[in-house]
Image (spheres, rainbow, N blue to C red):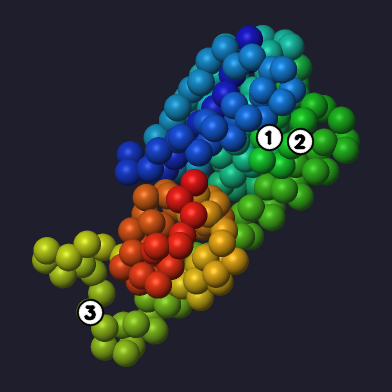
């Protein structure tokens, strides 16, 4: 049985990009995905209490489990390693499409898993720090935080990385790719560009 696990943090996001990435990865390797399992839950929640826990519990030796990327497994290094270790103990084969990695119980796989999951956690921490600093600065400058009545909200994460978003658009990086980098839905990125970087609206790559 070949499973594909898709996870988003809120119901305002969708799993389409993850699904497309997994399908592309699987097709290139002649892997047939028997079941796509979607989960709307924070990656900080114990993996055993998510749909992922049900998959691993019911999976049998030789079954295959595909994730779109390491951060979809869990948001902490410890939980990520727990998942990979238990999968290895049950002789499940784990694939991570974005990093094009295959994990088993070998020492090399464990080292790579630790490095990738730790890197993902550090990246999220830095983005969170920049977001908090940007909000703190805005508040100190007298800007009223929150959404005025009748106004559309501005994504704090994109606002904190405004210059980086502009630079990526200048280099013609797609909206979808920017969304994946910032861990933000593509539609949210598109709305942010229209409101705060209108000069790129006509020329932005939508795919």
Spatial separation of the CA atoms under disc 2 and disc 3:
45 Å
Spatial separation of the CA atoms under disc 1 and disc 2:
5 Å
User: Can you identify the residue that label 3 sits on?
Assistant: 144
Label located before the other in sequence (2 or 3): 2
Q: Is residue 34 above or below residue 75?
A: above
Q: Is residue 158 above or below residue 205?
A: below
Label located before the other in sequence (1 or 2): 1
Residue 101 x, y percent position in the rendering: 76, 35
Split into 4 quadrants, where in the image is the N terminus?
top right
- CB within 8 Å, label 2 to label 3: no
User: Can you identify the residue that label 1 sits on?
Assistant: 96
Residue 90 showing in the rendered view: no
User: Can you identify the residue that label 2 sits on?
Assistant: 101
| Residue positioned 55% across, 19% down in the render | 55
- Crowd class of label 1 (few under 14; some 14 to 19; many from 20; radius 10 Å): many
- CB within 8 Å, label 1 to label 2: yes
- Residue farthest to the bottom? 141
Q: Secondary structure at mark 3?
A: loop
């Amino acid at each position: 049985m070949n499973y594909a696990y898709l996870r988003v943090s809120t119901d305002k996001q969708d799993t389409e990009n993850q699904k497309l990435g997994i399908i592309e990865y699987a097709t290139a390797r002649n892997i047939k995905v028997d079941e796509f399992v979607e989960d709307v839950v924070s990656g900080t929640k114990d993996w055993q209490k998510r749909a992922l826990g049900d998959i691993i519990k019911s999976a049998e030796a030789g079954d295959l489990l595909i994730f779109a990327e390491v951060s979809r497994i869990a948001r902490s290094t410890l939980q990520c390693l727990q998942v990979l270790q238990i999968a290895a103990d049950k002789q499940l084969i784990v694939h991570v499409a974005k990093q094009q990695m295959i994990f088993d119980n070998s020492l090399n796989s464990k080292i790579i898993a630790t490095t990738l999951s730790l890197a993902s956690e550090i990246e999220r921490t830095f983005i969170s720090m920049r977001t908090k600093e940007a909000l703190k600065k805005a508040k100190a400058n007298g800007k009223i935080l929150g959404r005025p009545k009748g106004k559309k909200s501005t994504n704090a994460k994109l606002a904190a990385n405004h210059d980086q978003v502009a630079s990526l658009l200048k280099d013609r990086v797609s909206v979808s790719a920017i969304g994946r980098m910032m861990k933000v839905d593509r539609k949210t990125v598109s709305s942010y560009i229209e409101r705060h970087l209108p000069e790129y609206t006509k020329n932005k790559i939508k795919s």
